[in-house]
Structure formats: C-alpha cells, structure tokens
Image (spheres, grey):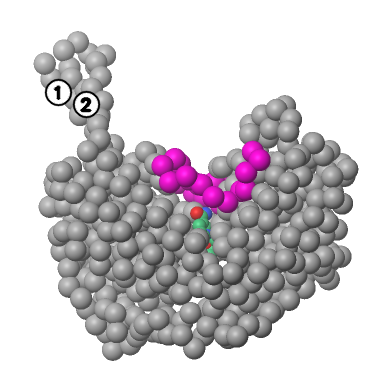
Amino acid sequence: MKPLFIGGNHVTTSHGVDNINPSDTSDIIDVYAQAGIAETEAAIAAATEAAGPWALSGPQQRHDILLAAGIEILARKAELGELLAREEGKVLPEAIGEVTRAGNIFLFFAGEALRQAGDILASVRPGVGVEVTREPVGVVGIIAPWNFPIAIPAWKIAPALCFGNTVVFKPAELVPGSAWALVEILHRAGLPPGVLNLVMGPGRVVGQAMLDDRRIDAITFTGSQATGERVAAASLPFLRKVQLEMGGKNPLVVLDDADLDVAVHCALDGAFFSTGQRCTASSRFIVTERIHDQFVGRLADQISALRVGHALQEETQIGPVVDESQLAQDMDYIEIARRQGGVLRSGGERVRRETDGYFLQPALITETTGDMRINSEEVFGPVASVMRVRDYDAALEQANSVVFGLSAGICTTSLKYASDFKRMAQAGMVMVNLPTAGVDYHVPFGGRKASSYGPREQGRYAAEFYTTVKTAYTAP
Ligand code: NAD
C-alpha cells in the first residue's frame, strides 16, 4: 500500500483504496492509503510547524529543490506518463505531454524563486522610505480534480513552495498515483519535513477537514462549481484567501469566412481530445448559416473515424471516460439533448473493446438551441453540440449567454471579427483559430463568471495568490 506523507514521514492507514485503470478495470495500479480526519489534522499541524522556518528559507534553497524536481519529472516523463495514462485514461502522448508540462512548471518556478523582487518608492513625506515586499501566505491547502493528475498539482505546488508557503495537498480520489509520485520526487529533491504533506482520501472527509481547519491560511481549489461554492462558503468565516477554478461551457464560434480545415481541426481537437475531459474543452459549436452544413458534415465524418480504445495502445486517439459515473453522466446528457430536440449526428454510443473499460464514441449533437440544457450545463465528456446562428453578432451573444466564462474560441479569417471577439468574449482566455483547450504554462490561466474566483493561476500572476503584500515605512 502506498502511504500518506505527513511531516516528512510515510504514514500507513488501515484502509486503502484500489487505483483502477479506466481502460481495463481488471488492472489495479496500486492500493493507496486513505486519510481520515486525524491524519488530515496531523498533516495541517505538520505544515503549520514547518511554515515559519520555510518562510525564512532562502531563494537558493527553494530554487534548487524546484529545479531538481523539474529535472527528475522531465527525465522520467515516459514512466510517469504511462502511470498517468493508466490511472486517468488519457492517451499516452497526451499523458507524456502533461508530465512534460508539469516538469516545465517546476523549472519556471525554480527561476521565479530567484526573481522575488519588491518595490522601493519615494514617500509623499520627505525623507521617509517606502518598501513594498511580498511574503508567504502561510499554510496553503490544495484540493485538486482528477482530469490533470500531475499538471494541476504541479501548477499549485510549485508556486506555493516557490513563494515560501507550506502545503497540505489532497488529490482527487481517482488519481492518487501521479500525486504520490510527485510528492515523493519533491521529498527526494530535498524538501524539509512538513513543508509538503499528502493526504489522500474522500473530499467529504479529507477535503472537508481541511475546509473546517482555521490553521489553513489559503485554499486553492480546482474542480466542479458545486464543490467550489462549498470551499468559498466554508472559508468565509475564517476570512481565508481562496482561489477557485471550476467548470466551463466553452464556445467555439465558426464564421462563414473561416478556413474550414482549421475550424474542423479546432473543433475536433478542442472538444474530443483528452476524451473531452478538459475544463477548457469546447462543448458548444456556434456556427453561422452558410458554413454550417459543410462544417457539420466534415466534422461528423472525422468524429466517426476517431479511434477510441485503451489509452496505452498506439493506435488509440481517444481514451476511456474516467469512470462509470462520469460515463453515465455523459450518456444522460446525450439523452437529455435528444429529448429536447437535438439530433445525434455522430457517435454517442458505448463501445466495447478487448478490455473492460469505459469507452464512449465521441458525440456530436446538431440542431440545438441556447435554451437546451446541453448548451448551458457542463457535461465534462466527449460530447459537443452545434447551434446554427444568423451572423457574428448572434454568435457572440450566444457565446456569452452561459454562466461560465473560461475559454472562448473563434475561427475566422476576418481581422475585424477576430479583434472584436478578443475584446467582447466574456472569458478568461480567448483563442483565435486555435482550439479552446491547450494553453501555455508560463502565462495566466483562469476564467471569469462562474468558472473562476480569485487571482489567476500560473506564470508570474501566480504570485497574487501565493503571497501577501507588505508596505513598510521607515522614518528618515
Ligand atoms: P469535484 O468538485 O468533484 O472534486 C474536486 C476535488 O474536490 C476533489 O479532490 C474532491 O475530492 C474534492 N471535494 C469533493 N467534495 C469536497 C468537499 N465537501 N470538501 C472539500 N473537498 C471536496 O470535481 P472533479 O469531478 O474532480 O473535477 C471535474 C470538475 O473540475 C469539472 O467541473 C471541471 O470543469 C473542473 N475543472 C476545472 C479546471 C479549471 O481550471 N477551471 C480544471 C480542471 C477541472
């Protein structure tokens, strides 16, 4: 059984949970210890005790640890990628790509550790000195989802440590393997005991115990909107800092003047790769009238040719859905869309392969309208809908009509419409002639409206959440 990490020690528990491969449910990757309230509280205590000394650790120490971890992650990307593909189900090249991203994030924040600058300003009072500096927030709680098992923990843990915080990290129940490997790498890279603690277990036990503990100074959460709202509500009485990254219902607008090859590529990649289980996945194609039939015809053909199967097989393009309940949710939404008048144009059926896995042929639903549930609620699977609209103005209105605002894309050859969309799309990220999913690791990531709350993640903007600003005045 793989243990918890608390205060620099391995901690075993009486209860363990199997990590099951969604491509082959007979493949048990390993058994992972499960924390209860007592272990979670011990982890918070360890992080609290380590917070003072770690806040005073120098940039060199933090740089060296983050650098060593990044180098090891990159050196082991094939092995870690295989583990990730086995536990989450994305295909091997995507999994290796995610591990590479995680490694690069550690290298980026290794550099940032050496670049922690402040400001010196002239006071309005003659002779007085003013210094503006950033200090660690303290103990950071990290609650992560299952769909990016190593990249999301990396983009939260790396800046937390870089800016001198200690961490209690709770991965999602379905993907403890990548989390465990990452924490082990960081300990071997030289992290002092208690600086990073790993507590695996259910959200309603471990996550809730973190929310209820006032020793956690800040919580960064990625997951569903419903859980995000709980995190915010539980944190308010403590006036705790929170950062929430939640769902999406990301539009891809396709205008009559689009390059059809580009549009179909953006749609296919953005909606269905990684089995559509990306918060930035396109799920609504908003298409103007003259290009509509050509776009749908070409896209439907390419969808039905997608090879769905075991994530580790070379020919597979789309891996399984992550588990039984997510598969049931995907199929339910296809049915709801049909009942409300949508037409299932391609895919949408469960497929059988040699191994017992959660395989779903990606689904395209046409003839949908903005008032249907398929166009307002997040499905989080390989399911996308098409809406036919009159012109650009109608497309923009439709794109902005949902509660979410994470990523928004447009395919057009018109500079006028591309520029207008960049300005007017109500989203944290806008893509022109690119898929809505697939972002750089060194620039801000996040959304607006119900998709995100609090400061941005990643790149230099990460400092906003992981530090607190101090303004010091000195008399002449
Ligand atoms: P989820 O909300 O079910 O779980 C997320 C995490 O919260 C898990 O670790 C879970 O154990 C924990 N949790 C659950 N109940 C809790 C509670 N009561 N208290 C504390 N923690 C609790 O989400 P999920 O199913 O793991 O992930 C899918 C969702 O994540 C989708 O909505 C997707 O859009 C979103 N997501 C968003 C982004 C983004 O950056 N915006 C990125 C990836 C995924």
> Which residue is nearer to you in this view: 83 or 148?
83
Which residue carries the number 2 mark?
131
**First to last magenta residue range:** 432-455
Q: Position of residue 211 (x, y in %)?
A: 37, 64
> Which residue is nearer to you in this view: 93 or 166?
93
Q: Which residue is painted at 58% across and 51% down in the image?
A: 437
Q: Are the residues flagged by discs 2 and 1 in contact, CB closer than 8 Å?
A: yes
Using the image, determine if residue 71 lies above or below residue 329.
Answer: above
What amino acid is labelled 1 in the image? Thr
What amino acid is labelled 2 in the image? Glu
- For residue 474, the mark is 1
- Under circle 2, the secondary element is strand
Q: Which residue is painted at 31% across and 68% down in the image?
A: 181
Q: Quadrant of residue 171?
A: bottom left
- Which residue in the rendered view is the most extreme toward the top? 126
Instruction: Judge the density around disc 1: few (<14), some (14-19), many (≥20) Cα neighbours within 10 Å.
Output: few
Q: Quadrant of the C terminus?
A: top left
Per the model, the C-alpha gap separating discs 2 and 1 is: 8 Å
